[in-house]
Amino acid sequence: MKKLIFIFSIIFITACSNESHSIYGEISSIEEGSINVGCSDLVSSKDDIGYSCTIKITNETLIKTQAGEVLTFDELNINNIVSVYFKEPISLSTGTERPTFEAKEITVIEN
């Protein structure tokens, strides 16, 4: 019974956490060494503000297509739909001007 309570507690804590290992969204802009992706779904807020996250891309970031074809940073385009996986779980809160996170992997879903 104690194990069951422990398992449910872990599931509850994880479900209520604002942490995420990835985001899915559209590239809204591209800057030197980073992209901006909409991340409003990760922000617990009742307002209608659209949130954008800056995704830092390093030499270690893997950029690829869904088919597994490796891409370069220069092949990313505004309006690409991407799935971004982070090195560490991220947490967003309202009031953060534009949060910045480092990408481990970026998969281009749609061009």
Image (cartoon, rainbow, N blue to C red):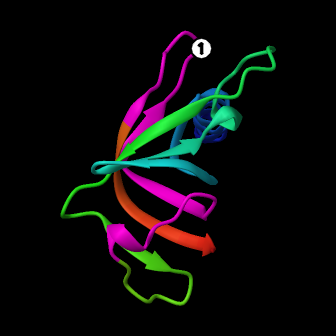
Residue 53, above or below 106: above
Q: Residue shown at 36%/53% (left/top)?
A: 103
Q: Quadrant of the C terminus?
A: bottom right
Q: Residue shown at 38%/80% (left/top)?
A: 71
Occupied quadrant, residue 79: bottom right
Q: Nearer the viewer, residue 91 or 24?
A: 24
Q: Is residue 79 magenta?
A: yes
Q: Position of residue 35 (x, y in %)?
A: 43, 49
Q: Is residue 69 magenta?
A: no
Q: Nearer the viewer, residue 14 or 110?
A: 110
Q: Residue furthest left?
A: 59
Q: Position of residue 82 (x, y in %)?
A: 57, 62
Q: Position of residue 8 (x, y in %)?
A: 67, 36
- Badge 1 is on which residue? 94
Q: Secondary structure at mark 1?
A: loop
Residue 92, above or below 8: above
Give, as a single range, the part of the protein colored magenta: 72-100
Q: Residue furthest top?
A: 95
In the visual, does 79 lie left or right of 84? right
Q: Count every numbered label the image shows and give the total.
A: 1
